Image (cartoon, rainbow, N blue to C red):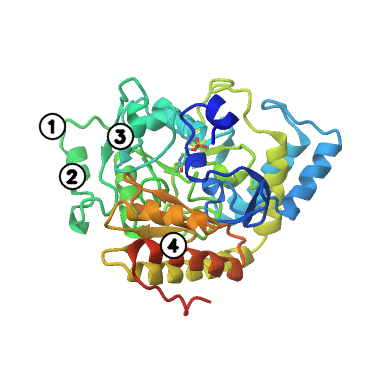
Amino acid sequence: MSDIFESLESEVRSYCRGWDTIFERASGSFLYSEDGRGYLDFFSGAGALNYGHNHPALLRPLMEYLLSGAVIHSLDMKTTAKRRFLETFHELILKPRNLDYKVMFPGPTGTNSVEAALKLARKVTGRTHVLGFTNAFHGMTLGSLAVTGNSMKRQGAGVPLTHASSIPYDGFLGDDALAFSWLRSALADSGSGLDKPAAVIVETVQGEGGLRAARASWLRELSDICHQYGILLIVDDVQAGCGRTGKFFSFEDVGIVPDIVCLSKSISAFGLPLALTLFKPELDLWKPGEHNGTFRGHNPAFVTGAAALEHFWQDGRFEQKIAAVAAQLHEGLRLIADATEGASVRGRGMLAGIHYSDPKAAGKIAAESFTRGLLVETSGPEGEVLKTMPALTISATELRRGLEILAEAAESVTGQRIVLKTVA
Ligand code: PMP
């Protein structure tokens, strides 16, 4: 069927190809197409909808704000909505975690946050080189692409991607002992040919690159090396942050304090564009207006972002809820993976999936899931990982239903019988 999406919209479109229906409404963990069919959402806007679709605790204040005649667009001017967001973020997120960060609004997307982080790291250290990791994903603009692993995405740059190199992520070499031996030796040896980097940028869980989750000990060692050599540590928490892996920041459990943190996706909590770059106060060497932009903090996003922090992050109850659904998700994924030889569960918290040794299996299971009413995507360089990201607010019943659909889809693709009976 040819339609306006195919005739007018560029070939670059992607998600709509696998999920070929027209979505009209959404509520909680469900999207509804124009023909009235409900789809359970295990995709969550690639992590932009951690609290589900149209959560009433966010929709209400947004509607009130929009109808009140309040300011919508204001560049980086002071507004009531921005003050409330900053105060709430400070009181409920930074202060209780003893995190002393300045907050920068770099532009509305994840890649804007990463570009600002890289630019600041280079400016502060006076060095140009940055280290990223195998299978990393940091965004589509040139600086972010230079530290992104995927060769197809890199090729799209059309220019050489410079001033960055890729080193092995946790598990890439398959040998724990090797983890940082090259990096340590290269930094210590002035003949190694490695220019001392301004920064290392890392995801604690690789959302797009195959759901590898770095071990806490590996992240701590990385942090130690950065301290030892005066290299800035940037954690890109665009996808793994905002509760996705269990705590607000994905590095909280790990015992590291990054120099710079990138946040976007669910920081607005409602699917509205908003990004932050957080950094230690001593790094705040920007000159006024040195990193500018028209959309650096949108007031409706401040309203929903502050409302979400107040609704979900006042105390530890939401973290307990995430822990419970994450345990259910992992148990279900494990049972599905166990049925297929060579399949294994990857990820952490509510950013988890199944790695299949047959690189085609995950894509087929995702397609079968869609026909059964479940949105789920794939991850990894060959799309070899089935990636689940349910809303953190999902009910146990909805989660069970989604796991059942996944199990049915996996059965139809692999021919292996799957029994989910122990999943709550
Ligand atoms: N960093 C990470 C870890 C991401 O997962 C993404 C998006 N998938 C980005 C950066 C880029 O964010 P955006 O698409 O909003 O530019």
Q: Nearer the viewer, mark 4 or mark 3?
A: 4
Residue 286 is situated, as x and y percent measured from the top left of the image, at 52, 25
Q: CA distance from mark 1 to mark 3?
A: 29 Å
Q: Residue furthest bottom?
A: 422
Residue 151, numbered label:
3
Q: Nearer the viewer, mark 1 or mark 2?
A: 2
> Mark 3 or 2 closer to N-term?
3
Residue 105 is situated, as x and y percent measured from the top left of the image, at 59, 33
Residue 409, numbered label:
4
Query: Label 4 sits on what residue type?
Result: Ala
Crowd band around label 2 with a 10 angstrom C-alpha radius: few (<14), some (14–19), many (20+): few
Query: Label 1 sits on what residue type?
Result: Gly
Residue nearest the viewer, comparing 330 with 262: 330
State if disc 1 and disc 4 touch (CB < 8 Å).
no
Question: Residue at the location (60% across, 52% down)?
Answer: 93
Residue 182, numbered label:
2
Q: Which residue is mark 1?
A: 191
Q: Quadrant of residue 352?
A: bottom left
Query: Label 2 sits on what residue type?
Result: Trp
Q: Is mark 2 within 8 Å of ligand 1?
A: no
